[in-house]
């Protein structure tokens, strides 16, 4: 095997997990993830295991941002989450899933 072949094989091995990674838009388009009324993403009833890691990552980032905003505004985290949830759901494209405050799923 030549050095060029080894480098190419290594590059493909490194890149392959990233190329298979699911994005939030892809997960929403496939109906795997939807938005909830608290400003976080959740697995929809058709959600799959591969979307769980993405869900955890997105929710962790969102929660950190919500905590930051709540601290700046000196308000409860729950209030920020509620406002964020309303805004996110309002901006969702047609055909995307969201969950209302009662936990029921809807398609916009």
Image (cartoon, rainbow, N blue to C red):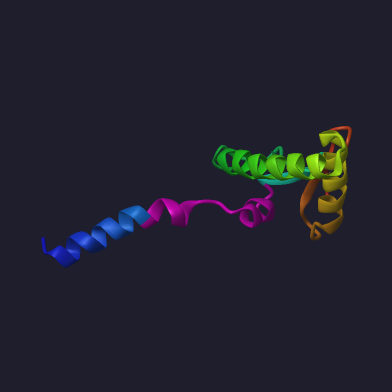
Residue 27 located within the stretch drawn in magenta = yes
Location of residue 70 with respect to 93 vertically, above or below: above
Q: In the image, which residues are magenta?
A: 15-31
Say whether residue 5 is visible: yes
Q: Main secondary structure of the magenta part?
A: helix
Residue 106 located within the stretch drawn in magenta = no
Q: Quadrant of the N terminus?
A: bottom left
29 sits left or right of 3 in the view: right
Toward the viewer: 36 or 64? 64
Q: Splitting the image into 4 quarters, where does residue 35 fall?
A: top right
Location of residue 73 with respect to 76 vertically, above or below: below
Residue 6, given in percent of the width and then of the height, sits at: 19, 59
Location of residue 5 with respect to 48 vertically, above or below: below
Q: Residue at x 86, y 39 (%)?
A: 74
Q: Residue at x 64, y 39 (%)?
A: 60
Total marks drawn?
0
- Seen as rendered, the residue at the extreme bottom is 4
46 sits left or right of 37 in the view: left
Say whether residue 37 is visible: no
71 sits left or right of 33 in the view: right
Q: Splitting the image into 4 quarters, where does residue 14 fall?
A: bottom left
Q: Residue at x 60, y 42 (%)?
A: 57
Residue 84, given in percent of the width and then of the height, sits at: 83, 47
Residue 2, given in percent of the width and then of the height, sits at: 11, 64
Q: Splitting the image into 4 quarters, where does residue 71 fall?
A: top right
Q: Residue at x 30, y 59 (%)?
A: 11
Toward the viewer: 93 or 106? 93
Residue 88, given in percent of the width and then of the height, sits at: 81, 52
């Amino acid at each position: 095997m030549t050095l060029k072949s080894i480098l190419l094989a290594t590059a493909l091995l490194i890149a392959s997990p990233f190329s298979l990674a699911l994005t939030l838009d892809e997960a929403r388009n496939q109906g795997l993830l939807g938005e909830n009324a608290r400003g976080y993403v959740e697995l929809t009833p058709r959600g799959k295991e591969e979307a769980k890691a993405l869900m955890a990552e997105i929710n962790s980032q969102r929660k950190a941002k919500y905590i930051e905003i709540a601290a700046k505004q000196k308000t409860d985290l729950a209030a920020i989450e509620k406002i964020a949830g309303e805004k996110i759901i309002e901006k969702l494209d047609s055909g995307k899933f969201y969950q209302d405050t009662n936990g029921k799923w809807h398609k916009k």
